[in-house]
Image (tube, rainbow, N blue to C red):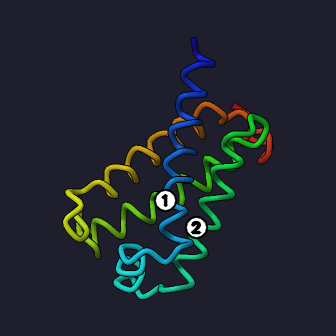
């Protein structure tokens, strides 16, 4: 049962991260608006898309889930902060959908980091 829950978290985070790539890489007006407002267009848009692509792929590979989840959580933390302090919860009348997706992805990634914390402790050779 735990394994199924972990895969649901992996798939949820990866699907959300991957589905936004089309908008970032195609230069969709919404993405251009967001990153222009943040003063990071086009490099921030493309860079965040690349990071999200790598994070999604790593999340789906069990051996590298921790690294993908760390990258995903970090990226989503930035997105959440951007919404809270610069963009607002609702961007161009989306009703807060992008903000909600960032929260869901952050939560999934944070749980995946927690579940894989022993790998993190091993990497840094920290004893419990």
Task: Tell me the residue that label 1 is attached to.
Answer: 20
Label 2–label 1 contact, CB within 8 A:
yes
Image coordinates of residue 39 in percent, x first then y, are 42, 88
Q: Residues within 10 Å of mark 2 (few under 14, many from 20)?
A: many
Disc 2 to disc 1, C-alpha distance = 8 Å
Residue under the point 36% across and 70% down: 82
Image coordinates of residue 37 in percent, x first then y, are 34, 84
Image coordinates of residue 6 in percent, x first then y, are 59, 26
Quadrant in which the N terminus appears: top right
Choose between 123 and 90: the one closer to the eye: 90
- Quick check: 64 above or below 8? below
Residue under the point 20% across and 57% down: 95
Image coordinates of residue 41 in percent, x first then y, are 48, 86
Task: Tell me the residue that label 2 is attached to.
Answer: 49
Quadrant in which the C terminus appears: top right
SS for dot 2: helix
Choose between 117 and 64: the one closer to the eye: 64
- Quick check: 43 above or below 85? below
- Quick check: 51 above or below 62? below
Labels in figure, total: 2
Dot 2 or dot 1, earlier in sequence = 1
Residue under the point 47% across and 85% down: 40
Residue under the point 79% across and 37% down: 63
Q: Quadrant of residue 119?
A: top right
Q: Residues within 10 Å of mark 1 (few under 14, many from 20)?
A: some
């Amino acid at each position: 049962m735990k394994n199924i829950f972990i895969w649901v978290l992996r798939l949820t985070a990866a699907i959300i991260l991957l589905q936004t790539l089309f908008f970032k890489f195609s230069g969709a007006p919404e993405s251009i608006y967001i990153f222009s407002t943040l003063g990071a267009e086009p490099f921030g848009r493309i860079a965040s898309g690349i990071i999200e692509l790598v994070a999604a792929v790593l999340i789906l590979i069990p051996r590298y889930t921790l690294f993908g989840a760390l990258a995903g959580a970090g990226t989503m933390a930035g997105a959440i902060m951007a919404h809270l302090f610069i963009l607002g919860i609702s961007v161009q009348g989306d009703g807060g959908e992008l903000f909600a997706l960032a929260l869901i992805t952050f939560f999934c990634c944070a749980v995946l980091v927690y579940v894989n914390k022993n790998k993190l402790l091993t990497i840094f050779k920290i004893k419990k």
